[in-house]
Amino acid sequence: MPLVIVSNRLPVTLTVSSKGGPASAGKKRHVSIGRSAGGLATGLSSYLASLHRGMLESDYIWVGWPGLTDPSVWSPELRDRLRSRQMEPVTTDEDMFKALPESAFTVRVGPGKTEARLRLENPSEVRRLLSSLVA
């Protein structure tokens, strides 16, 4: 079974720049991918490196927000670059629900269309669900 890591951020820092200096209007923009310092990314880095050495690269995926708020820099090429590093960038809960395997336990709280497997109407239902899971 693959390891699926879901966190609020991907374990990388994305930096937007353009040829010849910082990004500005009218210039071709490039996104560089660098390692994040600290937090969960640092804590898991040696373990994940061992997966690369000893197992198939598809044995894990890291799902999270990529840290970019400017939609103009998103491209299929950038998404492919992140996926080649075992990362699935998501920008909303619904993106995350779609990215996770069908066997994942996904929950949407409140109204609205959803890809989640389970819908709860309010925080009271969340408390009941969590109590039933630990009972």
Image (tube, rainbow, N blue to C red):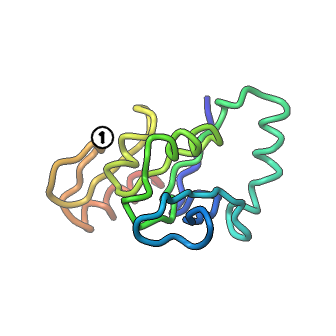
In this view, the residue in front, 36 or 127, is: 36
Amino acid under disc 1: Arg
Left/right placement of residue 64 relative to residue 36 reads left
Q: Is residue 134 depicted above or below 86 in this figure?
A: below
Q: Position of residue 4 (x, y in %)?
A: 57, 42
SS for dot 1: loop
Label 1 Cα crowd, 10 Å radius (few <14 / some 14-19 / many 20+): few
Indicate the quadrant containing the N terminus: top left, top right, bottom left or bottom right.
top right
Q: Position of residue 40 (x, y in %)?
A: 68, 63
Give the number of marks.
1
- Which residue shows up at 47% across the image and 63% down it? 27
Q: Position of residue 15 (x, y in %)?
A: 59, 65
Left/right placement of residue 38 relative to residue 135 reads right
Res 102 quadrant in image:
top left
Indicate the quadrant containing the C terminus: top left, top right, bottom left or bottom right.
bottom left
Furthest residue toward top:
56
Q: Is residue 52 depicted above or below 116 in this figure?
A: above
Q: Which residue bears the numbered disc 1?
A: 117
- Which residue shows up at 35% across the image and 57% down it? 92
- Which residue shows up at 46% across the image and 72% down it? 24
Res 9 quadrant in image:
bottom right
In this view, the residue in front, 102 or 16, is: 16
Q: Is residue 35 depicted above or below 119 in this figure?
A: below
In this view, the residue in front, 76 or 122, is: 76
Q: Is residue 110 depicted above or below 47 in this figure?
A: below
- Which residue shows up at 52% across the image and 47% down it? 78
Left/right placement of residue 123 relative to residue 71 reads left
